[in-house]
Each structure stands twice: as structure tokens, then as C-alpha cells.
Image: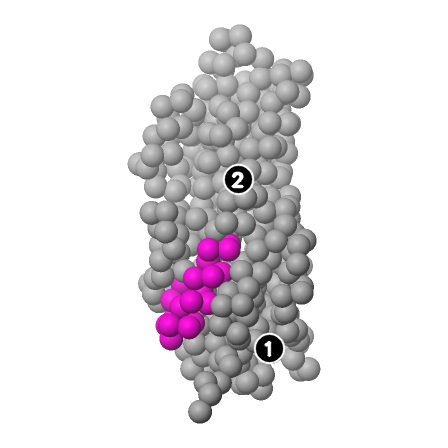
Amino acid sequence: MAKKKKHIAVLTSGGDCAGLNAAIRAVAHRAIEGYGWKVIGIVEGTRGLMERPLRYEELTLRIFTGAVLRMGGTILGTVNKGNPFAFPMPDGTVKDRSDDFVDGFKQLGLDALIGIGGDGSMKILGRLAEKGGIQFIGIPKTIDNDVAFTEFSVGFSTAMSVAVGALDCLQPTAASHGRVMILEVMGRDAGHIALNAGIAGGADVILIPEIPYNVDRVCDKIRRLQKSGRNHALVVCSEAIQFAGGKVSQTHVDGEVRYGGVGHILGEQIARETGAETRVTVLGHVQRGGSPNGRDRLLASAFGVAAVDLIAAGKTQRMVAWQHRDVVDVPLDEVVTRCSTVDVNGALVRTARGLGICVGD
Ligand code: F6P
């Protein structure tokens, strides 16, 4: 009897980033061209399978003829709230709607699922897959680069390049006006974007959540620069750095707590203590929305192909990862118990210190 053609689904989950479309494209190419399977794109992450009518579209190679590889965002849409296990209902209660997801998956007659997401999404998707007996492979993506067991997640490299580009734009205007420029970048509780971009973009001060900062040390550095004759300085800070009052966050109308705004506090502190004129740029979602750079396209492509190959090999509850110049796969249950933050004794912190950059301590 002829072997049944597999029908696999792919979805993007959590905050978007550059390179998601490149990953979707790679999944489609490998599954359709390599194995002759059918690929279904689920719309808006887990939502597409929870809602009725179900929201999905078949992904044919015609969709990927040229532009998609280069496009930011995700052609499938995504959500970063609405956990199916604790779904917020209109009446203010939360409901376990995981059965809706599993039922939706079964209704479509799917054989396997590839989920492109960060650590939070991996946890939820892995749990849903376990509940529904669904063959599942994860592809790590996040500008924060905090997914464990992978050196790089899709989207990080582009976000870092955007932050370097911002520093390149800030330096000349800082020098023209003799100002201290503060650039606040995203990254949640991991300082990878700030540290990488700060070094590559010639920052004088880099503040990351992993190293509690002492404002006196920061101001000492600015004063030393002033004494040496430099009329300007570049400061990069992660959105979740800890100042004396804790981390700066806001609760939005949807009840979600998001970081942001600490750059302004820092700017005022520096201005008050050093007399320098300060200006603050909060880079925000600019880091997420652009076209993926070459490295992210490459990583997304390698991950997409490997994820499909793992499905073909009958593997489940694994995540593809980049380690030592290669794609490997790691157990999802281990990935979700860890978070990869900056190693405060690692090469990049040592590099920053070696360059004379103040890291806040
Ligand atoms: O996790 C990615 C990320 O961009 C964080 O760096 C940031 O704190 C958060 O998402 C912003 O989320 P939202 O898209 O909900 O504003």
C-alpha cells in the first residue's frame, strides 16, 4: 500500500522578529520539494486552531517565489498573549481552551506541527502537543536571544544590526551637539542586544540586566570622557536594567506588563550628576520589524529544513538549535526549564571591559 502523504502545519507564535518568513519558506520548500508533503500555515499562532471556523491556508511554493524571504514580520500573523491553557475570556475570567486547539488540529487531519517561537511559546506548544499526542518540533526565534541550548535564535542578528545602525546614526549628532546619547534597546531580562550592539557600535557605557548598575560608576565614566576632551558619549541600556527603584515597566490596558522607559530615568540621572546634556532614544519595535539580514535568513533556512527532516525521522518534542557552526536538536522539556542570559564572565563582557567600556559596576 502506498505511504500516505503527510500533512504538516507550521505556525509562528509570540512576538514577531525578522526571519520568520524565511523559516516558514524553508519549512515549505523542504516539506513540499523534499518529501512531497502538504503544508498548512496556521493563522495567528495558536488562535488559528482555537477559533471556529479554523483559520489556516495551504502553503504552496508559489507563495514563496521571491519577496517572502526578504520580508519582515510573519505572513501567518502571530500573537504573544492568550495562552490556550489560561485563555482570557471577555467576562474577565480565564479558561482552559487547550482542547479547542487539539480539536482544531485533529479536524484538519494534520500529522505534525512545527512551531516557530521563543521560550514561552515552546513551553505552551510543547504542552499542547503532549496533550493532543501531536508530533511537534520547535524552531527558536526571538530578538532577545534568550532561548536555551541555541547560540542564536532567528531575529537576534537583525535586531542587533538595527541597534548598531541606531548607534551609527546617534554618534554624529551626539558629537555635533556635545551630548550624551542614551539608546534603550529591547531584550527583556537578557542583555544580549545591548551588549552585542554596544560593543559593535562603539558605546562608552553598556548596561544590561545581568549586571546591576551603579549610577556613580556610569557618571564617573562620563566625567572621565569629559576631562579627556571628548564632548559626547554613547550609552546603551537594556529595557530591563535594574536601577535603585527596580525594573521599569508599565501595565498596559490589556493587563500585560511590559518593560520600557528606563532610558529616560538614566538620562535624567546622568544629566543631574554630570551636567551633560542628555537625549534618549527608545528603539522599540524598530528592532523587530525590518527585513532580516543575511545571517537571520541563513539561520531560519537551516532551522526550517532541519525541523522538517526531524519530522520525517519521526522525532517529536525536540527543538532545533545552533551549536558550534551546526544545526542540532535538543529536548524541548530541557529547553523550557532554562533561559539563556548574558554570561557575566563570558567573552563579550570581558571584551567590553577590555575596551574600557563601563558596564555599570
Ligand atoms: O520578546 C521580544 C520582545 O520584543 C521583548 O524584547 C520586548 O520586551 C517585548 O517583546 C515587547 O512585547 P510587545 O510586542 O508585546 O510590545
Q: Residue reaching furthest front? A: 1
Question: Which residue is found at the position 66% from the left and 73% from the top?
Answer: 57
Q: Is mark 2 within 8 Å of ligand 1?
A: no
Question: Front-most of 253 and 229?
Answer: 229
Tell me the residue that label 1 is attached to: 49
Tell me the residue that label 2 is attached to: 160
Question: Front-most of 144 and 212?
Answer: 144
Which quadrant would residue 92 be assigned to in this image? bottom right
Looking at the image, tell me whether mark 1 or mark 2 is earlier in sequence order.
1
Q: Residue reaching furthest left? A: 345
113 relative to 270, above or below: below
Indicate the secondary structure of the residue bearing disc 2. Answer: helix
Question: Which residue is found at the position 53% from the left and 78% from the top?
Answer: 7
The amino acid marked with disc number 2 is Met
Q: Which residues are magenta?
A: 300-319
Give how far across and how far down residue 36 sits, in percent.
53, 74
Q: Main secondary structure of the magenta part?
A: helix
Q: Residues within 10 Å of mark 2 (few under 14, many from 20)?
A: many
Indicate the secondary structure of the residue bearing disc 1. Answer: helix
Give how far across and how far down residue 39 sits, in percent.
57, 73
Q: Is residue 313 magenta?
A: yes
Can residue 32 be seen here? The reply is yes
The amino acid marked with disc number 1 is Leu
Separation of marks 1 and 2 at Cα, in angstroms: 33 Å
